[in-house]
């Protein structure tokens, strides 16, 4: 659960990153623009993700807290996880704002809701593929045709086919990145099964995006984390009060899936 509130995947050994000073400046600029707002780590990472990888922003945050440039504390949530609160050092009366942030985060971080959000992503994506006349030939599967993945216990969310092409689909309806180790395993799994990797995610680092493209796969980025339609008011509050990219649609936008189907049609036509 803690990975929803700050980048926590074990990083490979990294030397000094030239982007850290710029990321530090971007974090300070964000805080200066909202001098009476309490943030949390994941929120800042997502807000700055177009410019910096989550792990770069997270490292910048840690340095700024250590240097006393911003204030921070880790709070235990009633849901069992932790949240890393952050606020401008000049903001003396931050407790009321912090209370509201915690209230909202606890609303969407209970395990039952997290599972519902995961299911919602898979359901909406599956429905969109069905509408586009892709046939689902496997769900939560490690098998396709006569092939089977036996290297680990991982599986693919589903496999779909159309026009003689099969895709191993992995849906990650999360604010944070999927784990890099899992990305690599799913790519290897698709290769073993003889299907094209297709990742449907809210967001993915450009380097990972290119890695998928280099093996002939496709990344469909949704931009938003998808909440169930029954929680449209919570989605609105999280979006408006926390500035987080969440939405509660009844279905995927046609234009979203069209990015993939246009790519698929080009594959078909080039054969």
Image (cartoon, rainbow, N blue to C red):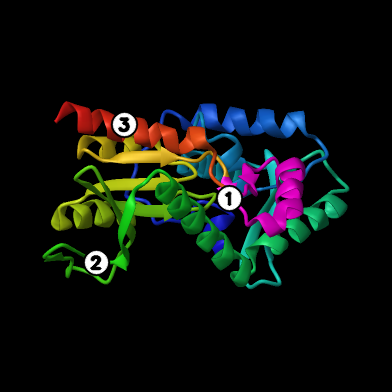
Asked if 184 appears above or below 113 in the picture, the reply is above
- The local secondary structure at tag 1 comes to strand
**Badge 1: few (under 14), some or many (20 or more) residues near its Cα, within 10 Å?**
many
- Residue that carries the numbered disc 1 in the rendered image: 226
> Which is in the foreground here, disc 3 or disc 2?
3
- The local secondary structure at tag 3 comes to helix
Q: Position of residue 83 (x, y in %)?
A: 65, 59
Quick one: quadrant of the C terminus? top left
Q: Is residue 101 visible?
A: yes
Depth order, front residue of 51/162: 162
- Residue that carries the numbered disc 3 in the rendered image: 263
Asked if 263 appears above or below 14 in the picture, the reply is above
**Distance of label 3 from label 2 (alpha carbons):** 25 Å
Depth order, front residue of 164/108: 164
Picture residue at 51% right of the left edge, 30% below the top: 50
Question: Residue 47 in magenta?
Answer: no
Picture residue at 55% right of the left edge, 62% below the top: 2
Direction from residue 246 to residue 241 in the image, left or right: right
Q: Position of residue 170 (x, y in %)?
A: 36, 54
Quick one: quadrant of the N terminus? bottom right
| Image marks 1 and 2: residues in contact by CB distance under 8 Å | no
Direction from residue 125 to residue 62 in the image, left or right: right
Q: Position of residue 9 (x, y in %)?
A: 42, 56
Res. 269 mark: none
| Image marks 1 and 3: residues in contact by CB distance under 8 Å | no
Asked if 183 appears above or below 257 in the picture, the reply is below
Res. 142 mark: 2
Depth order, front residue of 107/68: 107
- Residue range in magenta is 225-250
Q: Position of residue 262 (x, y in %)?
A: 35, 30
In this figure, what is the number of numbered marks? 3
């Amino acid at each position: 659960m803690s990975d929803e509130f700050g980048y926590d995947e074990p990083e490979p050994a990294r030397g000094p990153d030239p982007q850290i000073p710029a990321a530090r400046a971007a974090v300070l600029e964000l805080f200066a623009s909202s001098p009476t707002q309490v943030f949390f780590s994941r929120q800042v990472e997502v807000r700055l993700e177009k410019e910096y990888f989550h792990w770069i922003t997270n490292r910048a945050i840690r340095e700024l807290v250590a240097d006393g440039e911003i204030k921070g504390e880790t709070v235990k949530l009633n849901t069992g996880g932790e949240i890393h609160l952050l606020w401008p050092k000049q903001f003396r009366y931050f407790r009321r704002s912090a209370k509201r942030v915690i209230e909202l985060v606890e609303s969407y971080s209970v395990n039952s809701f997290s599972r519902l959000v995961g299911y919602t992503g898979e359901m909406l994506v599956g429905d969109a593929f069905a509408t586009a006349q892709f046939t689902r030939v496997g769900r939560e599967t490690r098998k396709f045709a006569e092939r089977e993945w036996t290297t680990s216990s991982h599986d693919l969310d589903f496999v779909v086919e159309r026009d003689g092409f099969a895709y191993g689909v992995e849906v990650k309806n999360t604010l944070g990145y999927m784990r890099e180790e899992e990305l690599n395993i799913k790519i290897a799994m698709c290769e073993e099964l003889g299907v094209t990797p297709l990742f449907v995610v809210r967001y993915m680092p450009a380097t990972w995006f290119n890695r998928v493209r280099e093996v002939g796969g496709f990344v469909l980025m949704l931009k938003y984390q998808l909440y169930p339609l029954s929680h449209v008011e919570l989605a609105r509050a999280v979006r408006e009060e926390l500035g987080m990219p969440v939405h509660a649609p009844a279905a995927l936008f046609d234009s979203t899936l069209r990015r993939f189907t246009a790519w698929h049609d080009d594959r078909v036509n080039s054969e």
